[in-house]
Image (cartoon, coloured by chain):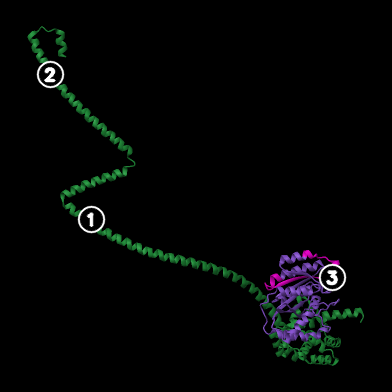
Chain colours: A green, B purple
Amino acid sequence: MPEEQAFCLLVRLMYGYGLRELYKDGFEALYMRLHQLDRLMEEQLTDLRAHFQELGVEPHMFASQWFLTVFTARFPLPLVYHILDVFLLQGMDTLFQVSLALLTRARKDLLQHDFEGVLKYFRVTLPKKCRAEEASRQIVKLACSIKVKRLQKYQLEYEKFIKESAEKEKINVELERLKVINTQLQQERDMFESQLKETRSSLEVVQKESVHYAAVARDYRDICARLDKQLHQMLECVNSCVSCSVKMAQKDNKEDLEQKDEEKESSSDTEARLKQRVRDLELELAQVKLAHVQAQCSNQELSHQLNAALNEMQAAMNQKQTVAPWLVRTLSK
Amino acid sequence: MATNRSGAAQRPNGAPQTKVCQFKLVLLGESAVGKSSLVLRFVKGQFHEYQESTIGAAFLTQTLCLDDTTVKFEIWDTAGQERYHSLAPMYYRGAQAAIVVYDITNQDTFGRAKNWVKELQRQASPSIVIALAGNKSDLAAKRMVEFEEAQAYADENGLLFMETSAKTAMNVNDIFLAIANKLPKSESVGGGAAGGARRLNDADAPRSSSCCK
């Protein structure tokens, strides 16, 4: 085939037949196709699909290569030619038809194998079993007889699933965030609860104490009231007795003074000193007065003596008249 | 390889009950660094100069015999092209081990390998055993990634590290052995011994066929 024609064929396969879609964007379209294959298997090869599910064999493990290479990677060329012919005739559906035909023919063998065996079968045994010319003709014949329906439905289903899982992922992220917050809040709540518990227990202690103290206070009030009553009775008793009442009054005064003294003790230090001084001065004054009285007394006595003496002297003068006049004047003063 | 085969063949003949551990291992790395070639060398002891590009992913198994344990690797050999990146999680999810491969003659593939390691550390099982393989060590003359640089990176990240050559078989078995040794052997698979052996014997015949993915 000339180069130009080959290129045209490639372009046609990529754009006309839609193969290009399979390789784009992280194989999104490939995975959609694989989902369609999975659903077709569920429809037409129920037991094999169940077996695969049980083993954990997923369509991408064996069919990625089938789809991405249109079966050219591993199968013998006679079969590849047949498949390409049909593919060019029918398009994308051929991928499913051939896949289902291969799986149908291998079904019995595959059901015998475990995970590793199944994958080895796809890699080694299956291509070998397609070598014979007859086998490849039978495969293509079987493929063409297989009806492929509801592809559109499965596509929508897959797109919905992808959208949902993207949303789920978002929700999961949000959920994780909320879980973290929730854990924090729970921790806080636990902390607060334990604090509350502590507070409650201390409150109980305090309440018990307060009940106890209230009882004590009541007892004291009772005692006080009783004593008050006794005191009143005593006072009445005392008041009815005269001498006792006087004593009581004095005692009260004394008590008052003492009280005042006590009160003033600290502040009336100077006052006390002044008082002492006053008392000293009063004593001095009294002594002075006494001395004054004594002096007056002796003065009076001396006056008496003088008068007596003067009288004697007058008498003598009258008798003698010879006494010098200066003496008379001095004595009369 | 011979020892592995004979080891596998012994079991059905009533070898004393050795513990059988089954591990899922995934190969990751830029395209054309030699992931499929490493697997082909490890599983079949072969090397194809013109190895086809992997489409999707290929599943293979191989069994190794340690002292008292038979370790069976279920290997997912993934396609390296960037377009397949979105599919990778399907294969490394639940994997107990991973080999991240780069090409020692291509610095870009080493950067890509680091990204794979980061992704595995973030997304894969936390206990996953990761090995870094600097492949194509037979082309040391064209080396662009220094051994010491890769070794330092591996040490920093707790990775097993070897430079390998699928072409000369250098360190290929060794890196799988190192992984097997590092994996915890507690999860013995009950009844897996006989089945595994049967399957392996089945597989011996078609191995000579053209299939190599």
Q: Residue at x 85, y 91 (%)?
A: A132
Can you tell which quarter of the image residue A100 is in?
A: bottom right
**The one of A147 and B46 positioned closer to us in this rendering:** B46
| Residue A214 in the figure: left or right of residue A308 | right
Q: Amino acid at mark 1?
A: Leu
Q: Which label sits on residue A305? A: 2
Q: Chain of mark 3?
A: B
**The one of B86 and A18 positioned closer to us in this rendering:** B86
Can you tell which quarter of the image residue B96 is in?
A: bottom right
Q: Secondary structure at mark 1?
A: helix
The residue where tag 1 is placed is A231
Q: Amino acid at mark 3?
A: Asp
Coordinates of residue B65 in the picture (x, y in percent): 74, 79
Within the magenta stretch, is there residue A253? no
Q: Residue at x 81, y 89 (%)?
A: A129
Q: Secondary structure at mark 2?
A: helix
Q: Secondary structure at mark 3?
A: helix
The residue where tag 3 is placed is B138
Co-location on one chain, circles 3 and 2: no
Q: Residue at x 14, y 8 (%)?
A: A325
Residue segment shown in magenta: B120-149
| Residue A172 in the figure: left or right of residue B38 | left
C-alpha span from label 3 to label 1: 120 Å
Q: Looking at the image, which residue sits at the far front?
A: B16
Within the magenta stretch, is there residue B144? yes
Whether tag 3 and tag 1 are in contact, CB under 8 A, the answer is: no
Coordinates of residue B11 in the picture (x, y in percent): 73, 84
> Is the residue A205 above or below the residue A256 in the image?
below
**Dot in front, 3 or 1:** 3
